[in-house]
Image: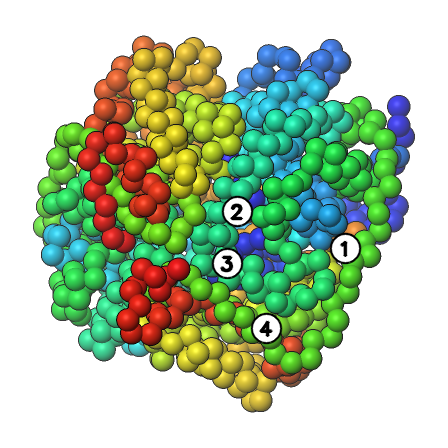
Amino acid sequence: MKRVTRTGRPRTLATALAVALAAIACASSSSKESDSALSAAATAAGTPAWLQPPPPPKEAPVVRPGALHDASLDNGLRVMVLEDRRLPLAVVGVTLPRGAAIESLEEAGLASFTTELMQQGAGEWDALALASVVDDIGASLVVSSSWDSSSVVVVGLERDLDRLLEILATVLLEPRFDPAEAERVRAEQRATLVRARDEPGTLVSWHALATLYPEHRFGVPAMGTNESVQRLDAEAARNFHGRVFTPDGAIFFAAGDVKADRMRDEASRRFGAAAWPSRERTAVSPAPPERVPTAREIVVIDRPDLAQARIVVTHEGLARSDDDRVGADLMNKVLGGSGFASRLMQRVRADEGLTYSVSSGFDLRRHPGPFRISTFTRASETRRVVDLLLAEMERIRSEPPSEDELARAKSLAVGRFGLSLESSEAVLASLVDLAVYDLPADSLDTYRSRVRAIDTAETKRLANLLIHPDRAAIVVLGPAEVVAPQLEDLGEVRIVQP
Amino acid sequence: MQIRLGSWKPLARLHSMLLAASLLCPVVLVPAAHALEDPAASVVATTFENGLTVLTLEDDSTPVVSFQVWVKAGSVDEDRFTGIAHLFEHMMFKGSANIRPEEHARLINARGGRLNAFTSKDFTVYFEDVTSESLPLVIDLEHERFANLRVGESTLDTEREVVLEERRLRTEDSPQGRGLEALFALTWSAHPYRTPVIGWRSDVEKVTVEACQAFFDTYYAPNNLVIAIVGDFDTAETLAHLERTFGTLPPGEPPVRRPTLEPEQRGERRATVYFDLKSAILAAAWHAPASGSADSEALDVASQILSSGRSSRLYRSLVYEAQKALFAQGGYWELVQAGIFYAFAGVRPGESVDEVERLFFEVVDEMREQGVRQAEVDKAVRQIEVSLAGGTATAHALASRIGREMATFGRIRPLEERLAAYRAVTPEDVQRVVATYLVEDQRNVVHVVPEPSEPAGAGEAEARR
């Protein structure tokens, strides 16, 4: 046995060690004993750990008891506070359950435009003054929108908490919507749309969405189009703000080195009925068609200069609140949603060396978003890869996840869930997300047991219900001259310009 | 999850990487009431008899462990085949005496763990983030591949194709990737940092099993590794486990790094890369000092003043006022043997890259000639403080910090030391480093632009060829 010696050399470390023993005050050493017993047993046997039955996963409560505070104000605003004093940082924000999905096609990009413009001046501050107020204290301000929500979030040091809250309230409630700034933001948004098309991955995904939803808002990028953005101005942003940034269904949240009592007081003073009156809740957008496409579509976007073909195979998917979402996620993990644990990665990358990455997934939104498989390969191998993708879609139906595959997918889901909630910010973000979709607040606590309740009969049912190789759209970006002929016997190939 | 090449990161993200990399230690300049203890202060450093260094840092606030192996080998160490450090990193997932190809990743995945690896110019890093009961599995699996790796002809051929797809993805079909590859080759005319981490295509196509085996034998010896473990585990027990496994690996003789030194640059160098795009790219670099330089804090502060936030000089000038660029960043990137200060900007469609370049260098010239204000330095230091505090939030971030510091400096720089260095930066220091390093005859400039159309008469399709 080799001698283990502490290094004497880094004296700093030795000193550090002494300091340290006093330091990590937040650490509690509860389950240490059982741990030790476990791995001692494992190694005593002399067999490597991969040949032994896995120890039971160590699961901590998602939220430490007493750390989360949840209340509602009389204007409908929900207040969620998660105390965590490990770092001297604070995150404060407001999220509203309305985003780009409520735009009409004609005004596509309005949510992006409005949220960007909100950062270009508020209250007494013009654009540059606001930027300085944020930067001077090392804070960051992000105003953003997704398909189903919009948010204002401010992060900084706890000792600047008053200022962070002031920035949040001013940007949220008193944006200036200056016409000159609006013009600048509009030009920038249009330029960004043009630039995004330089990126092959973005371009192919936009074409895939356009193929699935030719007449629905989902068919156009969240940022809109050159034409729709051209129509936007300060007035449109002001109106959108008026109808979206209301307290109905909104959530004020604070995490980090904050005190719940004080945050509740601040929320009701700054965002209560007097400061932020309730309004009629805006109607949600119309749902997209249930089945898209109804028959096979093949689209090739011609980029003669590229060596690689970007491939998307796609059709309709699931809604965020669908009861099948946990089972569908497990089925998808087996298909292509879990890296090397997935069938697609094994087949296309590990066995054949045809790609660097392949993945599948459901884009969960309030209305069902797309299901898609995305990958890329050298242009000459396009057909081989498309065939492999379609074959694996077929196989997940005909040979649904086995007991072993499902067991692996479940422990992956449960383990990743634990890892993803390492920081308080992440826990709070998950809780806010549940609130946005009107899902039960205890969803995080019940998640592990819901995963464990799924059986192979269920994943088989879901594979057959949700995966449709026969009519999925095949969208490929690459040199059409090389790519299109390979796909011709799969159906009519439509070649489009980027 | 996939094995990802972290190799190099696009300069667009360099700035955040810079913070993650060079400033990572949580420096906090705060009044006592808010003092943040340096979590890395409780690191235990252990050296085994075979020369392996192990850093352990217990924190059981969440039941998570990050395990990282830092191998002191990167693309800088390659001789015959560029890209071998990275291709070899892929081969580490392709099986060993007792583990089939991909089984390592599959086993970690099946426990819900995250694993990955990346290769940089200086290091190759393997990591697993797992819930704590899986640490023994991680150690056994890592030991298995360090002890019993098998590089086979057919797996190498398959993985070579995977890497070539990765190269097409990140470099050949990416305007940004093309631009950076050109920039490094232009900036370093002799030093091995000039080669792309992923390697030149013709080398990747030729790497042999024997070359892989030799690379492994040379560099993957225990005395060339730093293992960093952070999270919820028992130190004594884990060290004992490591001793039974990694402790039995025979030490090697990793060569002392003696790279070709970069000769002094005399005069600006320029290159143009054609790509079918609408938004041209400006990428430039000046030579700057290596990690650990006395000027590094002042260079970091200069980076912040140029690029951090909407009140930064570059954003205000190029994006907000002139409206010629969609983004513009400049920053210090330190490597073990040399550094660069980079400039990177996305030109608005329809605007000229020459004009963006002129405006960019005007901002730099102004800093050199007129200096910066104390308020700007204060703001920069505050921004650094916030990002450093945030950088200690996860076990993974802490393990990265201590692993990198130990592999680079042979020690973990204490917070107080870093803090004092940032606080000591004056406006004069910032002006001095800008005047010293960001000079015209040390500058290397790359434009990524669409190929100009041929004169009237030629069709567009031909013009593109």
* Tag 4 and tag 3 share a subunit: yes
Disc 3 or 2, which lies upstream in sequence? Answer: 2
Which element type, helix, strand or loop, lies under badge 3? helix
Q: CA distance from mark 4 to mark 3?
A: 15 Å
Q: CA distance from mark 3 to mark 2?
A: 10 Å
Badge 3 density bin: few <14, some 14–19, many ≥20, Cα 10 Å: some
Badge 2 density bin: few <14, some 14–19, many ≥20, Cα 10 Å: many
Q: Position of residue B308 (x, y in %)?
A: 49, 68
Q: CA distance from mark 4 to mark 1?
A: 29 Å
Residue wearing tag 3: B178
Above or below for A473 versus A330: below
Pointer 2 indicates a residue of which chain?
B
Query: Can you tell which mark lies on residue B409?
Result: 1
Q: Position of residue A245 (x, y in %)?
A: 20, 56
Which residue is pictured at 56% across the width and 59% down the height? B181
Does residue A407 appear to the left or right of A386 in the view shown?
A: right
Q: Are marks 4 and 1 in contact (CB under 8 Å)?
A: no
Which residue is pictured at 45% across the width and 59% down the height? B175
Badge 4 density bin: few <14, some 14–19, many ≥20, Cα 10 Å: many
Above or below for A298 versus A470: below
Rendered-image quadrant of the C terminus of chain B:
bottom left
Q: Are marks 4 and 3 in contact (CB under 8 Å)?
A: no
